[in-house]
Image (cartoon, rainbow, N blue to C red):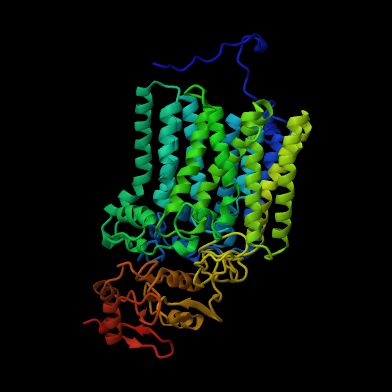
Amino acid sequence: MTTLAPPPAPTAQDGGHRAAPPAAGSRLRRLFTGAPEDPRWARPALWAILVLATALYAWNLSSVTGNTFYDAAVYSGTRSWKAFFFGALDSGSFITVDKPPFALWVMGLSARAFGYGTWQLMLPMVAAGTGSVALLYRVVKRDFGAVAATIAGLALTLTPITVAITRDTNPDPVLVFLMLLGAAALMKAVRTGRLMPLVWSGVAIGFAFNTKMMQAYVVLPVFFLVYLWATRLGLGRRIRNLAVGTVALVVSSAWWMVVVDLVPASSRPYIGGSTDNTVWDLVIGYNGFGRIFGASSSVGSQGNGASFGGEAGLYRLFNSIMGGQISWLIPFALVALIGGLVLRGRAPRTDPKRAALLLWGGWFVLHYLTFALAEGTFHPYYVTAMAPGVAALAGIGGVMLYRAFREGSFARWGWVLPGAIAVSAVWAVVLLQRVSGSGTPYTVAEVVAGVAGAVAVTGLLLGRFTGRQRLTGIAALAAVVALLAGPAAYSASAASSSTNGTNPTAGPSTGGMGGGGMGGQRPSGSGGPSGGTSGATGSGTSGATSQGQPPTGTGSTGKGSTGTGGTGTQVSSAMVSYLKKNQDGATWLVAVATDQTASSLILESGQPVISMGGWSGSDDAMTLAKLKSLVKSGKLHYIVVSSEGGQSTNSEISTWVKKNGTAVSAYSGLYRLDASDVG
């Protein structure tokens, strides 16, 4: 059985003793200058990349509108710890959002600590985005050096969809950060054979599960494979450790779900997106197999959602909607993965470089197949989870192929790197041609990608034939410019303009269907309505707010409007004022058909609002018996009902309300109900 090698003995160079750990001052200097064995440029380059990432993610936060759906849930969580724990949309805890609450907790704690507003909600997202870049750099550098890590970090920073989604309040930036924590811990477990890093890897993925459920598990097959194959332990110990790590994964994943499902339904909010009011159904349905296979038993999964990212198929991530968001480096990453595995083909089983290639290659391939072939609801920003795999392969493969180009047989390797650069540069030009006329930055990027790509390929070949290493080095830099010019233009666009809060994308509109916020208000400091680059309706605007005060202002779906009731009924700011004036001590301001309208009203009024049908209007959260009970107890007086377009109110409820309630003549579809109206 293979055993761990003993630690190296003290050498004459250190006087027969272990070197003392560096002093605090030395550690602080290394933070800014790097380790002595690193190139002098390495640490300054890392800091420059992190500053660039922070600037892209945090630039002009006043233009950030975010996703009103999650913003409302965060706001409600600042008003009620019960709503905070369950991830309820409203502070009265009638219904939850359709995701687990970890990202809401992170934003909610920031809002509780610093007050509710734009930068308070965005602070955790920016930190997660920049932290992901730093984590990727660290993991890649450990096995492949500073050059590969720098390229990987820069590629992740400039991934357009990553910039767009990190400037939003969707949970994906937190998801990616947690998955990268899991990858870093896994690689440490592989290198050292120690159990605890593997346990922490499972815990990180478990928290990622509590951020976006089954999407966090996409990487698990390759995690298991890499650990079983490459760890420096005997097979029995590998299996035992993996079993322990799996227990940690299951516990950290399931604890919230188990707690919530054990709480009586009458004592907690309805689980939004589920068909039977359980988190388990949400896991396997709407946020699980429903995303992959489309229509299923889960209500929420019945919307195919293909229009958000194009028709499902292997070409999806290269189409006119998705191509500019993620595909720039995919051709290079694929060549790099194959070439890297060939180069490490005869390495020992425990070779850490091959283990890293398997990890990032599996990360890339599994995400690609999942997103390309998914028949269920699919938004472009989901693919930000694939970006670390693509970026890591770009850095790792670039260095490995460059060394093979310079040192290997020209007949075998002389064409691989130039060919990969040429294909990727041509693809960049094709992507930029699709948006020609959209603005000067894209035209400039097209020229730069084409010229730099030609310089890179020509310089590499000339340098190899003439033996001029300086020329090949310059050509390699030109290749980096060629491959990142297009993503840089898209990323700058995402950072300098407001994006669609519900379906954020980077760059010019390419025909993707947006799913913008339905109006309502933003936290303090937000700017005008989002004019999302996908061309959809944006979220609303707001005036300044301070800690403990509700957001105020007017919405963006029309003058003085906070949108529609999901039923064709216009919900105006005047209606909100009327409802607040006549709330008469009720817990909920009003009941409406969908989450979109409810979230807008929550942010407009600062009061709890019931969403009777969840996101799509099809959830069975409100029943007639439950409505009668709320009205009879005085917890609800007003309800918006209509069957004219959009998602209509449950027909049984609508019929009863119209028969027993009092119509508010000034506002079509609004009815008043009191205890005396309940038979």
In-front residue for pair 108/289: 289
For residue 461, side relative to residue 617 (left or right): right
Question: Residue 221: x percent and y percent?
Answer: 40, 39
Total marks drawn? 0
Can you say whether 265 is above or below 126 in the image?
Answer: below
Say which quarter of the image contains residue 50: top right
Can you say whether 462 is above or below 532 in the image?
Answer: above
In-front residue for pair 108/442: 442
Quarter of the image with the C terminus in it = bottom left
Residue visible at 49% across and 55% down?
Answer: 316
For residue 307, side relative to residue 656 (left or right): right
In-front residue for pair 82/197: 197
Question: Residue 480: x percent and y percent?
Answer: 69, 43
Can you say whether 637 is above or below 209 in the image?
Answer: below
Residue visible at 45% across and 32% down?
Answer: 226
Of all residues, the one furthest to the left in this rendering is: 679
Can you say whether 7 is above or below 293 in the image?
Answer: above
Residue 652 visible in the snapshot: yes
Question: Residue 344: x percent and y percent?
Answer: 54, 27
Question: Residue 245: x percent and y percent?
Answer: 38, 34
Residue visible at 65% across and 42% down?
Answer: 421
For residue 21, side relative to residue 366 (left or right): right
In-front residue for pair 236/68: 236
Quarter of the image with the N terminus in it = top left
Say which quarter of the image contains residue 31: top right
Residue 102 visible in the snapshot: no
